[in-house]
């Protein structure tokens, strides 16, 4: 959910850095809150109402990825091998570390990993192969979708970002359409034609609209889009739509598109704002990948600790006692594990490129 370095092309700027960083923080927070509600259901007296919408954080991450893949490759000469090497070098080291930690726990006590049930595949966990089994780090399933998108995008990257945008959008829309019109039960086909790929296309469309076409919306319209997205998410939650997972690329992707486009439109206002809250969100945006990968470990340990001290009866205490240490732990993991690990990975083959913004990271 991070991106590789890029040099700017004419017409492309790094003006959207802060808004995207804040959206990363929002996406990570939503996922953490979802899993806090899961822990409450396990150790408390039923899950708090309304937390299921936290799953939409993943959908926001996918839209961000579609946008950033365009932003980060714009104006660069890349081929398939280099593009994929940059992706692997940026994404995989920290993921492999968390997977290895989960493996140690799994070998000690398999029931402590993927406690929701299902068979765990060790080899698939390390290579992100979607075989229908659980990964050691349960959040790794989203990286399987990320890397499939990267593969499609990389096939045309040697022709430049514009060609890669068109090619990947067409392929992913075809796959989404096949999944929409031809229902099937096979896991492999379901993965290849999942409507989650529609969300990457939404991110690509935002890059085209805001960066290529230079579209600008007034701040009022940006706020309206954010509110519309929030209301659509809330409405979908209240409507209790049957089998929402089958349509999440549309049910959650489109509301998250409104939020994404709205916050991009508010970039100038966000930059002018000066508040401690904004600083916290920007810091969380930087550490969102670490938070996303380590929060299951932190939440599991904290929830067991709270249960031992009989402090799981109060919603607010339970949520705060899990949320605050988890966010702090994610930031510390980013500073003292992810960043040094990424710096170490940069020593391996892939030519260095100059930095241009904190949005884009190798």
Image (spheres, rainbow, N blue to C red):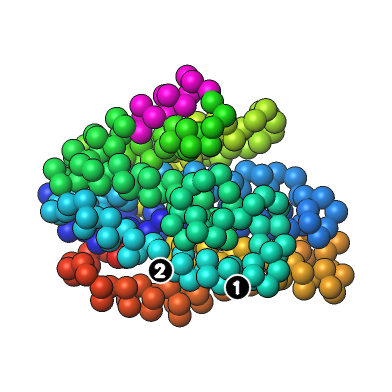
In the image, what residue occupies the spot 29% across and 37% down? 168
Is the N terminus in the top left, top right, bottom left or bottom right quadrant?
bottom left
Which of the 4 image quarters holds residue 152? Answer: top left
Q: Residue 258, how many percent across, how many down?
A: 45, 37
Identify the residue at image location x=66%, y=62%. Answer: 113
Q: Is residue 221 visible?
A: no
- Residue hosting label 2: 93
Instruction: Identify which residue, 195 or 40, lies in the foreground.
Output: 195
Badge 2 marks a residue whose secondary structure is helix
Viewer-side residue, 112 vs 212: 112
Name the magenta segment's main secondary structure. Answer: helix
- Cα gap from disc 1 to disc 2, whole angstroms: 17 Å
- For residue 104, the mark is 1
Residue 110, percent across and down? 69, 64
Whether residue 180 appears in magenta in the rendering, the answer is yes
Q: Which residues are magenta?
A: 172-183
Between 330 and 104, the residue placed more toward the observer is: 104
Residue at the image point whose x is 38% and y is 40% from the top: 200
- Location of residue 223 in the rendering, given as x and y in whole percent from the top left corner: 46, 42
The residue carrying pointer 1 sits among few (fewer than 14), some (14 to 19) or many (20 or more) residues within 10 Å by Cα, namely few
Label 2 Cα crowd, 10 Å radius (few <14 / some 14-19 / many 20+): some
- In this rendering, does residue 99 appear at all? yes
Find numbered disc 1 in the image and state the secondary structure of the residue it sits on: helix
């Amino acid at each position: 959910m991070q991106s590789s370095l890029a040099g700017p092309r004419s017409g492309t700027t790094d003006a959207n850095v802060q808004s995207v960083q804040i959206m990363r923080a929002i996406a990570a927070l939503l996922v953490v809150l979802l899993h806090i509600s899961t822990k409450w259901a396990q150790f408390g007296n039923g899950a708090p109402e309304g937390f299921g919408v936290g799953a939409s954080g993943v959908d926001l991450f996918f839209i961000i990825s579609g946008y950033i893949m365009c932003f980060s490759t714009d104006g660069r000469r890349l081929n398939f091998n280099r593009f994929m090497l940059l992706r692997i070098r940026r994404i995989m080291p920290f993921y492999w570390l968390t997977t290895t930690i989960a493996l140690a726990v799994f070998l000690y006590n398999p029931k402590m990993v993927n406690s929701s049930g299902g068979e765990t595949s060790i080899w698939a966990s390390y290579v992100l192969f979607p075989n229908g089994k659980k990964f050691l780090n349960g959040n790794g399933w989203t990286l399987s979708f990320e890397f499939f998108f990267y593969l499609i995008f990389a096939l045309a990257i040697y022709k430049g970002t514009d060609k890669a945008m068109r090619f990947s959008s067409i392929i992913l829309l075809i796959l989404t359409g096949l999944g929409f019109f031809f229902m099937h039960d096979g896991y492999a086909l379901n993965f290849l034609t999942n409507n989650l790929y529609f969300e990457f296309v939404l991110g690509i469309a935002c890059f085209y609209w805001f960066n290529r076409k230079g579209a600008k919306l007034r701040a009022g319209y940006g706020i309206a889009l954010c509110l519309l997205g929030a209301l659509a998410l809330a409405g979908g939650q209240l409507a209790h739509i049957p089998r929402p997972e089958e349509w999440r690329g549309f049910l959650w992707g489109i509301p998250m598109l409104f939020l994404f486009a709205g916050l991009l439109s508010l970039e100038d206002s966000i930059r002018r704002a000066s508040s401690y809250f904004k600083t916290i969100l920007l810091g969380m945006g930087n550490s969102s990948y670490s938070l996303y990968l380590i929060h299951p470990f932190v939440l599991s340990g904290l929830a067991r600790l709270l249960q031992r001290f009989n402090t799981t009866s109060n919603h607010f205490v339970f949520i705060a006692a899990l949320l605050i240490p988890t966010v702090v732990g994610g930031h510390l993991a980013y500073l003292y594990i992810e960043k040094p690990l990424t710096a170490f990975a940069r020593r391996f083959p892939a030519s260095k490129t100059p930095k241009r913004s904190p949005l884009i990271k190798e």
